[in-house]
């Protein structure tokens, strides 16, 4: 008789089938987990949308697309928007079984670029999703006119800038009776602020700002200057800006000397510009000249 002493255990047919069935069950379990796990994970998404550009003081509305591969249930969702200047709650409107829209509105008063974050949370599962966009806020446009339009860099005189505040009243929701200048002495041309400020109510209101020419850092050949400031509305101080045409000269250097007479003053062009501006702005100029000379306008 053949002896099995010293040899390993011999597997029977039942043991082989048992091991095979065990492997099949484990493999089937892995497949089942691979199918089931993604199904229980949240498929909530939000798309904040494209970037926006608005004027200061005007509302901007965000319409973010929200979707879910499961049945969209707005009652289990909540949304908020971080505007970079504060956070507000947002409305969620269900569009169909799997999609909805997150809606929120905000008003920026100061010019600049802001990052906006839209956040949606599923209160049942605890899943939170976010997306961002940028909002660029431009200042309200001010109507700016300069007198004289020829700026002599070697002159110690004063340049007058007329800023029409009526343009600030054009944005939506503004109260025309309550809009004023926040602080006219803070109106700037570069780093220069006006030495003197007058106000004329003609044509809805005009600020008369006087700057020392030596304070204006403009290069010869520049064709315009930009004035920035703020207007006070019922919502707060709104950024405003305007550009006025000006001719910057530096008499005594080559061909540019023809603008002056060699003593640092471009008299002929300035006299011509003064006469022209008195014709264009008779009331503002007379009021300004009267106050400058100590006389009542």
Image (cartoon, grey):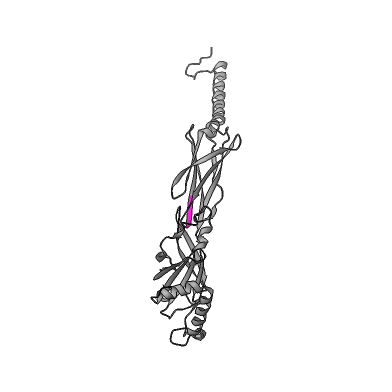
For this orientation, the residue located farthest to the top is 1
> Does 39 appear in magenta?
no
Where is residue 68? Give x, y as percent.
Answer: 56, 36
Where is residue 191? Give x, y as percent.
Answer: 41, 68
Q: Which residues are magenta?
A: 111-115
Judge whether 47 appears above or below 137 on screen.
Answer: above
Quarter where residue 100 is shown = top right
Closer to the camera in the image, 1 or 60: 60
Judge whether 73 appears above or below 177 on screen.
Answer: above
| Type of secondary structure dominating the magenta stretch | strand
Judge whether 19 appears above or below 283 on screen.
Answer: above
Closer to the camera in the image, 53 or 69: 53
For this orientation, the residue located farthest to the front is 296
Closer to the camera in the image, 195 or 191: 195
Where is residue 244? Give x, y as percent.
Answer: 51, 70
At 46% from the left and 64% from the top, the residue drawn is: 228
Where is residue 143? Give x, y as percent.
Answer: 52, 66
């Amino acid at each position: 008789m053949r002896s099995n002493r010293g040899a390993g255990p011999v597997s029977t047919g039942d043991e082989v089938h048992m091991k095979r069935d065990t492997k099949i069950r484990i493999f089937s379990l892995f497949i089942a987990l691979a199918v089931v796990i993604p199904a229980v994970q949240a498929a909530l998404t939000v798309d904040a949308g494209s970037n926006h550009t608005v004027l200061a003081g005007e509302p901007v509305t965000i319409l973010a697309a929200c979707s879910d591969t499961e049945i969209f249930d707005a009652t289990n969702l909540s949304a908020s928007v971080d505007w970079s200047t504060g956070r507000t709650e947002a409305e969620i409107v269900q569009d169909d079984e799997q999609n909805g829209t997150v809606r929120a509105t905000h008003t920026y008063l100061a010019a600049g670029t802001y990052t906006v974050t839209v956040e949606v949370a599923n209160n049942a599962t605890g899943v939170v999703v976010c997306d961002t966009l940028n909002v660029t806020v431009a200042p309200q446009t001010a109507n700016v006119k300069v007198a004289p339009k020829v700026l002599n860099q070697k002159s110690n005189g004063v340049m007058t800038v007329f800023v029409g505040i009526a343009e600030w009243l054009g944005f939506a929701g503004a109260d025309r009776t309550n809009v004023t200048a926040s602080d006219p002495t803070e109106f700037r041309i570069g780093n220069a602020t006006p030495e003197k400020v007058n106000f004329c109510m003609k044509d809805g209101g005009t600020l008369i700002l006087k700057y020392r020419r030596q304070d204006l850092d403009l290069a010869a050949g520049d064709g315009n200057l930009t004035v920035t400031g703020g207007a006070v509305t019922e919502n707060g101080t709104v950024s405003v800006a305007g550009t006025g045409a000006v001719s910057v000269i530096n008499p005594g250097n080559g061909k540019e000397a023809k603008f002056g007479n060699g003593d640092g003053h471009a008299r002929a062009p300035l006299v011509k510009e003064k006469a022209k501006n008195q014709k264009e702005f008779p009331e503002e100029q007379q009021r300004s000249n009267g106050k400058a000379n100590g006389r009542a306008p």
